Amino acid sequence: AQKVTQAQTEISVVEKEDVTLDCVYETRDTTYYLFWYKQPPSGELVFLIRRNSFDEQNEISGRYSWNFQKSTSSFNFTITASQVVDSAVYFCALSDPSTNAGKSTFGDGTTLTVKP
Amino acid sequence: DTGVSQDPRHKITKRGQNVTFRCDPISEHNRLYWYRQTLGQGPEFLTYFQNEAQLEKSRLLSDRFSAERPKGSFSTLEIQRTEQGDSAMYLCASSERSWDRVRAGELFFGEGSRLTVL
């Protein structure tokens, strides 16, 4: 069975600080996808990034970056120079592309508050 | 707006009543998912359609729940004889069946239908 753990329930930072959200996953699959989604107060989950288990390098996209460590089953997400609009609940998710890539197992989320 | 739309956004009902939610996915997406989210938790997978075929159902989906996607476009989720434990946000998402590995698995969510059972 797949499992995603987001140990940080809530994080509060001041605007312009960098913030890292932790995610640890469990799966027996050798190939899998990892995702980060953002859920602002309006409620609609928005896809942010996806990572394939077979990709080796970490990437940066604008103010977002992620650190995938297969050896420790972690997929951490960093927002650089945080802004008030980044305040939301962030979910890490895991899926098995060999069966159903859209059937994701989500963590319980980390609530990020960015104060001005 | 060509995103995923859900209706109604909020539904308050009394225990024992039936409710139905509708989801209109992004038009070119052939895969449609229903998830349920309770307060303080992440979404949980309920069921999945590829075109009009319901290909997978979670054990969370009891016999009181039924979902359809009759023409491979919009979908409905009906809950019969609602119970207080059914109170949750019901999320619909769609995705394209892409052979492009870059997009596979990316879900586009609607704003959800919040159900309150009194």
Image (spheres, coloured by chain):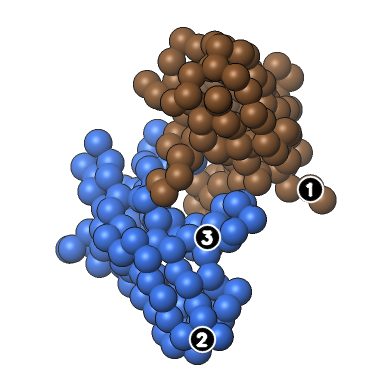
Chain colours: A blue, B brown
Q: Residue at x 55, y 38 (%)?
A: B89
Q: Say what secondary structure mark 2 lies in.
A: loop
State whether residue B15 appears in this view. Answer: yes
Front residue of B86 and A62: B86
The answer to whether A30 is drawn above or below residue A88 in the figure is: above
B42 lies left or right of B15 = left
Q: Is B81 on the left or on the right of A68, as rendered?
A: right
Of circles 1 and 3, the one toward us is 3
Residue at (48%, 24%) from the top-left corner?
B84
Residue contact between numbered discs 2 and 1, judged by CB atoms under 8 Å? no
Looking at the image, is mark 2 or mark 1 nearer the viewer? 2
Tell me the SS state at disc 1: loop
Residue A36 percent location from the top left of the image: 45, 59
Please name the residue that numbered disc 3 is placed on. A38
Q: Is residue A101 visible?
A: no
Label 3 vs 2, first from the N-terminus: 2
